[in-house]
Image (cartoon, grey):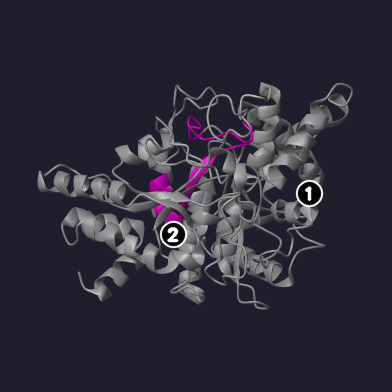
Amino acid sequence: MAQTAAHELIKLTAAETAAKIAAGEVTAVQVTEAHLARIEAVDEKVHAFLHVDREGALAQARAVDAKRERGEKLGPLAGVPLALKDIFTTEGVPTTVGSKILEGWIPPYDATVTERLKAADVVILGKTNMDEFAMGSSTENSAYGPTGNPWDLTRIPGGSGGGSSAALASYEAPLAIGTDTGGSIRQPAAVTGTVGVKPTYGGVSRYGMVAFSSSLDQGGPCARTVLDAALLHEAIAGHDPLDSTSIDAPVPAVVEAARNGSVQGMRVGVVKQFRGEGYQDGVIQRFDESVALMKELGAEIVELDCPSFDLALAAYYLIAPSECSSNLARFDAMRYGLRVGDDGTKSAEDVTALTREAGFGPEVKRRIMLGTYALSSGYYDAYYGSAQKVRTLITREFEKAFEQVDVIVSPTTPTTAFPIGERADDPMAMYLADVCTLPVNLAGNAAMSLPCGLAPEDGLPVGLQIIAPTMKDDRLYKVGAAVEAAFVEKWGHPLLEEAPSL
């Protein structure tokens, strides 16, 4: 295949790629080889991938081509390459969760998401970099080094799923999977000019997804267009009896909504708490333009006051660390993963302590200690119990808001991508990157981030967040597709044609 053809292939949307494969205009192997070549050419600079499964990807692609040759009907994403966040177990492929404590671990089974991707004939290229155990907003907490933002490699690609978002923005993959505990799909999407969706909690199975905070974690689709995200959402969503938190209900009609985008007659809420001190001028400017655009398209804009949202950051950073201190107790050097100091002279307790000291990074240790303290005798009610009460207040405010509006919109993140290292020594500044996304996780709602232009002061992407009630994920795609189409018509394609740093 000519170099120009390969360059064209990596620029196609997932929907376009699947259509060409189904029509026989190109093979799945050719598409996979084009993306593997792109990874080889640019990933040394971007560092989006922790592991590239070249042979596995090509084998999956050959299977798709064989299906087509036999005349079998191909699914809507058959043969489309995907970058999988390194938090989902993948049989025979390393799964590290960005941590030294699982370095070299090869899972013996597939996560449900991985299994469903394979069943949909999606080609998994490899595993992407992430903040260790999904704890972070910049992918700087990875034990294997940071990922760069393809718009400016000296800046962060968001976190914890920065590897997945960077793979999309650098054209290393047209699709990716992320996880969202407090914004880790949406915030990376915002700062890289891509689309990221946090489904309703329980809408996508968590079985085989290494747990950080079980009541908040949610896997979801990442893409470069709203339709591509919808196609991926449909492929991975649905009830799973292996996950006790999985919702036993039909998947909302997300693809149909993405194909029929409209905000005509919809009531769109704007929460006053999602702006003010700490918000970059260019981010607010692009957000206000997006709201004006929705009004032009026929939406009614409704001002909302949700005072409990101001407490979301504090509540989240008690609930999430408390759950992480419980979940990460399984990494004890006895069952799997790293083992340090087992020389026959030390007790099991000593080996566990030495292993955790060597295997966990600073941010993970910080959150484990914070969570263990919050759950300790005498402090449980004052900290964890109080945070759960705030969570209830936030959920009720969302419910009250959705009695008045169909969706809520906000900036996805208060600023554009910040320089790598700028907030490394200031945890509070880092945590504030998720101030707009955290309330959604606490309430379990569905939310999307999509590009809404570039900030005039630095030329970096800005994200628009759309929030929908639980199990109304289709509203995200209906509104998102309408806004995306209007942006393309008014200002040109909001997504990068070629990442400036590559």
Q: Residues within 10 Å of mark 1 (few under 14, many from 20)?
A: some
Q: What amino acid type should be assigned to the residue bearing mark 2?
A: Thr
- The answer to whether residue 486 is left or right of residue 217 is left
- The answer to whether residue 283 is left or right of residue 478 is right
Q: Which numbered mark, 1 or 2, is in the foreground of this view?
A: 2
Q: Residues within 10 Å of mark 2 (few under 14, many from 20)?
A: many
The answer to whether residue 406 shows anywhere in this view is no
Name the element at disc 2: loop
Sooner in the amino-acid sequence: mark 1 or mark 2: 2
Viewer-closest of 236 and 266: 236
- The answer to whether residue 368 is left or right of residue 447 is right
Where residue 429 appears, as percent x and y from the top left, is 78, 57
- Label 1 to label 2: alpha-carbon separation: 31 Å
**Dividing the image into 4 quarters, which one contains the N terminus?**
bottom left
Where is residue 391, by image quadrant? Answer: top right
In magenta stretch: residue 227: yes
298 above or below 266? below
What's the magenta region? 203-232
The residue that disc 2 covers is 225
At horizontal 71% and vertical 38% (from top left) the residue drawn is 400
The residue that disc 1 covers is 305
Q: What amino acid type should be assigned to the residue bearing mark 1?
A: Asp
Q: Main secondary structure of the magenta part?
A: loop
Where residue 344 appears, as percent x and y from the top left, is 62, 24
